[in-house]
Amino acid sequence: MGFGHRVYKNYDPRAKIIKTMADKVFEVTGRNPLLDIALELEKIALQDEYFVKRKLYPNVDFYSGLIYQAMGFPEDMFPVLFAIARTSGWLAQWEEMLQDKDQKIARPRQIYKGPSERHYVPLDERS
């Protein structure tokens, strides 16, 4: 997670933008020591034969988690935030599929393994 992308066989252009945004966020929030680790990991990976041969570069998720953390989001919210950012793309792909006359059936590759039903307690009723 954080390196490689099915589409981008060069440096993910979104990763360049978010890396710059991370610098701006940390100017406001104070520098996170994990950023230094991420920068060093990126530097090493971009020189490593395994990553170079497979054209694996940092993707947008490599730095976004650090930004979410700096903004005060708990780590268990990161998957939700990653999903929110992708929703418009997912919907666009779904719409394209619906408009494709040759597409007869959708076969999602994800299998939901969460609870089938959960009891909801409104905020004002929680103790």
Image (cartoon, rainbow, N blue to C red):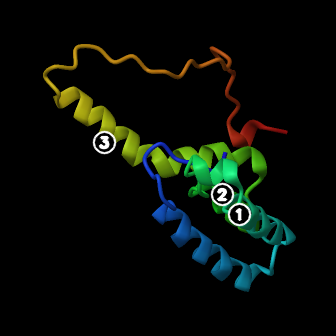
Q: Position of residue 122 (x, y in %)?
A: 67, 36
Task: Give me the C-alpha separation between circle 2 and circle 1.
Answer: 9 Å
- Depth check, mark 3 against mark 1: the one in front is 1
- The mark found on residue 7 in the picture is none
For label 2, the crowd category at 10 Å Cα-Cα, with few meaning under 14, some 14 to 19 and many 20 or more, is many
Q: Quadrant of the C terminus?
A: top right
* Residue that label 1 marks: 42
For label 1, the crowd category at 10 Å Cα-Cα, with few meaning under 14, some 14 to 19 and many 20 or more, is some
- 2, above or below 116, in the image: below
Q: Quadrant of the N terminus?
A: top right
- Depth check, mark 2 against mark 1: the one in front is 1
* Badge 1 element: helix
Q: Residue at x 54, y 44 (%)?
A: 83
Disc 1 marks a residue whose amino acid type is Glu
Mark 2 or mark 3: whose residue is earlier in sequence:
2
- Depth check, mark 2 against mark 3: the one in front is 2
* Residue that label 3 marks: 92
Task: Give me the C-alpha separation between circle 3 and circle 1.
Answer: 31 Å
Q: CB atoms at circles 2 and 1 under 8 Å apart?
A: yes
- 42, above or below 51, in the image: below
**Residue 2 visible in the current orientation:** no
Q: Relative to residue 101, is residue 24 drawn left or right?
A: right
Q: Relative to residue 31, is residue 56 drawn left or right?
A: left
Q: Quadrant of residue 70?
A: bottom right
Mark 2 or mark 1: whose residue is earlier in sequence:
1
- The mark found on residue 62 in the picture is 2
For label 3, the crowd category at 10 Å Cα-Cα, with few meaning under 14, some 14 to 19 and many 20 or more, is few
Q: Position of residue 56 (x, y in %)?
A: 59, 51
